[in-house]
Image (cartoon, rainbow, N blue to C red):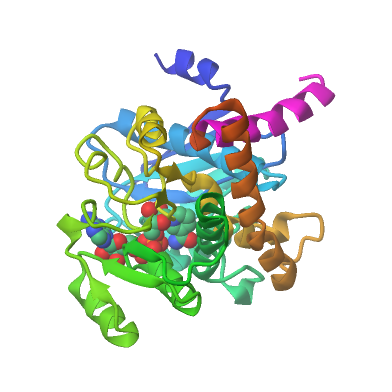
Amino acid sequence: KLFDYLEKYDYENLFICQEKETGLKAVIAIHDTTLGPAVGGCRMWIYDHEDDAIEDALRLARGMTYKYAAAGINLGGGKTVIIGNPYKDKTEALFRALGRFINRLGGRYITGADVGTTMQDMEYIRTETPHIVTVPESYGGAGDIAPYTALGTFQGIKASANEIYGSDSLEGKTVLVQGLGKVGGNLIKLLTDAKAKILIADTDERLVAKYRDEYKLQVIQPELVYETECDIFAPCALGATVNDQTIDKLKCTIIAGAANNTLKEERHGEILKQKGILFAPDYIVNAGGTIFDTDRLGVSGVHNKERAVQNVLKVYDTTKTVFKIAKEKNITPMDAADLYAKKRIDELKKLRNI
Ligand code: NAD
């Protein structure tokens, strides 16, 4: 029921991109361009069914609309999904073919890196189209954005602490960081400076050893993360970590991390609310990298690091605003975030008589 789904969630376009010569099989979804051109990364992944790739592109594009709207950025939501093995199927020709498709959209959709794609892939796309955001600093882009995703996540954690403990201070608070990759690793540095008591977990033993030795941190085995007592659980690895199997084990007061789609299903947000665990919506808290990355798409057209960082720091205020709405309306913070994002889009739509 593809068209029913597109209608239900107000999608604007869905493009299927195929090129026999390069083996390109991709889907570009544009959700909403009320606030500005649709922006969202390009994911490359192996999908069992083509329908799964389409669903992923659609779901992720809608998520980007809300992320930008809530962060106060004048961009819409879109996403590309390439069906393929990111370890085996990548070629310059494939990414250039995708670049040509994106170029034909004339700027309504702007792409970037995501799971399974790298800066090198982005450089190939850039040779065919200027409608791309994640490019190296030498191309006028923002460069590595993970430190800014971590900075935004740190703001979200502080706002959550303020909500529960009445102070931004993380001194002495136990923070369990799950995932020590690009974001989690950068977050460790910020939490260390804030004098938090940090617990770490990762399935990659080399990363665990690195952070344990460098920062003298206590290690938690990955399978024991959910039942470990802590003040703040910061998921920075995979999505869907709050699910039927984990939710009753949790012994934290706050969940605030960078991982996308932490709640497996909407109802898990409701259960957390009943349990008195504060959930800081992931797309609000992890918007820092995106805010930093898209700075040059603003009116000035040039990336300005100082301004971009100032905007990343605003994740604190957005998180607090969302908590305030949740409290006032007695709804989950996730529902409050959606409401906050939608309100901005709806008001603009009304003004434009759409
Ligand atoms: P990454 O791949 O660099 O790091 C993820 C880490 O999680 C890896 O070190 C991996 O070994 C670890 N991991 C995997 N399974 C685990 C498990 N079961 N238990 C513990 N650790 C496990 O990814 P990243 O770029 O740091 O992103 C982390 C999360 O944040 C992802 O969900 C991503 O979608 C989200 N995110 C990232 C950015 C960004 O700027 N990179 C922006 C927004 C959201």
Determine which quarter of the picture holds residue 246: top left
Q: Position of residue 195 (x, y in %)?
A: 46, 76
Residue 201 pos. (x, y %): 25, 65
Outermost front residue: 166
Is residue 132 or residue 33 the one in the foreground?
A: 33
Task: Using residue 130 as the reference point, say whether residue 49 is left or right of it.
Answer: left
Residue located at (22% from left, 44% from top): 249
| Image spot of residue 150 (x, y percent) | 49, 65
The magenta stretch is 335-354
Q: Is residue 176 above or below residue 261?
A: below
Quadrant of the snapshot with the C terminus: top right
- State the residue at coordinates (22%, 36%): 48
* Residue at x 25% of width, y 32% of height: 49
Magenta stretch: dominant secondary structure: helix
Residue at 31% across / 48% down in the picture?
A: 45
* In-image side of 269 versus 6 (left or right): left
Magenta stretch encompasses residue 352: yes
User: Which of the four quarters of the rendered structure image does ligand 1 lie in?
Assistant: bottom left
Which quadrant holds the N terminus? Answer: top left
- Residue 161: in sight, yes or no? yes
Q: Nearer the viewer, residue 37 or 173?
A: 173
Please give left or right for residue 44 compared with residue 202 in the image.
Answer: right
- Tell me, yes or no, whether the highlighted magenta stretch contains residue 316: no
Q: Position of residue 215 (x, y in %)?
A: 34, 83
How many numbered marks appear?
Answer: 0
* Quadrant housing residue 213: bottom left
For the question of whether residue 235 can be seen, the reply is no
